[in-house]
Amino acid sequence: MSLAVVHSRALDALRSPQVTVEVHLANGLPSFTLVGLADTEVKEARERVRAALQTSGLEFPNNKRITVNLAPADLPKESGRFDLPIALGILAASDQIDAAKLARFEFAGELSLAGELRPVRGALAMALAAAHESADPPRAMVLPIESASQAARVDGVAIHAAAHLLEVVRSLLPGDSAEPLPSAVPAPVAPPTSRGDLRDVRGQSGAKRALEIAAAGGHSVLMVGPPGSGKSMLAQRFAGLLPPLTHDESIESAALLSLTGAAAAHTWGERVLRSPHHSASSAALVGGGSPPRPGEISLAHHGVLFLDELPEFQRHALEALREPLETGRVTISRAARQADFPARFQLLAAMNPCPCGHLGSALRACRCTPDVVARYQGRLSGPLLDRIDLQVEVPAVAATTLADAPGGDSSAAMALRVAQARGRALQRQGVLNRELAGESLERHCTLDAAASNFLQSVSVRLGWSARGFHRVLRIARSIADLAGSEAIVLAHVAEAVQYRRVLAVQ
């Protein structure tokens, strides 16, 4: 009878709790039993491990009763990440490798039938969890090469890379015959992806101004205009106005993307732009499934979520965005468990003013009746519109004037102004203007008498909620920061008011 213990990690939303893989060999009828709340993918590891050991020239104990326990037993286990720990546990229990060396490492990796190591999801989340735990001494991690290159960006934990099961086995041989695994090297960062220049969008100076204000304060935007007016082009170029991600923000963004296997070196440090199709369900937007996976709003964390054709999304999918827009987090509750994901994203949305798209256009007549227009715009609830900071009209530009329409400032010039405005806000209050609330909102958004009287009269006349009133204050604060003004004056408030009146907030 022999027992071996190998350390690994599972995935539970963005958490990565420790998992102890216990392998027990005993005499009796030959069998291979796997217990510990394992998913189907994990149970299939029995056949992958058996084939990988045999094709690699290692001995599989066919005449033994093999029991593998994944502890803790009440934690769900999924994916093929436990293939490598199970294989090493069998080898250690059958005295083919040094079992004492296993205690210094954590292992994760899917095995091919030929013994090659395939990447696993959530490598960054696993490395973050290992770095934040107070193990003494801390365990190093052994991962497949592609996963190791992602995890190597996390400080505080040693990461080793391996391409084949035999490489890991040779590093765990007893005595001086062991060949240590190389340390993982972060994948080189590719040059930033070209997102286009806002100068490519002719005209639309009002929309560009709104996007600059949104970038400065982190505000959400709804663009309303006829087809072909440039709404999608503006949205695709918006991320170019935002400053690069910090190292911590890059880690958080990449860790969430790694949960879906989407993290890549060429997106490291860049603001993510997610643009789901309007047929996306509420689970696709906010997250869901079993086990819970992050949705588009979490995958856009520290980035931009662009929802084109906003009224065409399912009503309940749009309503699910209301709480994350306020809190910056989403909690997915199921009968057996909860999953919490960050969702601090910037919402950009676009829509036509009516079903035919030409309401208010000077180029083409609208053929929609007032009732049809009301039903179309009524697909967006008042509470959702109330949570969108800026509403901006994007009018059609006539073909005869399109070539001569001014291009305006470049994205680089606007990004410089945005960076300066964000710097003023962070130096003054430590957060972006969209996050001002309570006492800090009152302290940093003080109005003079003229501006205060004007805002109160407009608020009463338009029937704004307290949320809408405070959002105008935050927008005015961002406009003042772009102007380099410490005080919010009447002109700043008047401009901010204009961005709340395109669609009526019921």
Image: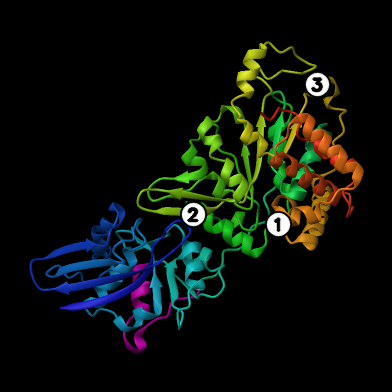
Quarter of image, res 19: bottom left
Residue in the foreground of this view, choosing between 84 and 217: 217
Quarter of image, res 503: top right
Asked if residue 282 shows in the view, the reply is yes
What span is colored magenta in the figure? 164-183
- Is 188 on the left-hand or right-hand side of 108? right
- Is 77 on the left-hand or right-hand side of 458? left
338 relative to 497, above or below: below
User: Are discs 2 and 3 less than 8 Å apart at CB?
Assistant: no
Between disc 2 and disc 3, the foreground one is: 2
11 relative to 18, above or below: above
**Secondary element at image label 2:** strand
Rounded to the nearest angstrom, the CA distance separating label 3 from label 1 is 36 Å
**Residue assigned mark 2:** 340
- Is 126 on the left-hand or right-hand side of 72? right
**Residue assigned mark 3:** 399
Residue type for callout 3: Ala
Residue type for callout 2: Asp
Residue in the foreground of this view, choosing between 233 and 72: 72
Scheme by which the image is coloured: rainbow
**Residue assigned mark 1:** 244
Q: Which percent across, then down, holds residue 210?
A: 78, 39
Sequence-wise, the earlier of marks 3 and 1 is 1
Sequence-wise, the earlier of marks 2 and 1 is 1
Q: Which percent across, then down, holds residue 461?
A: 79, 29
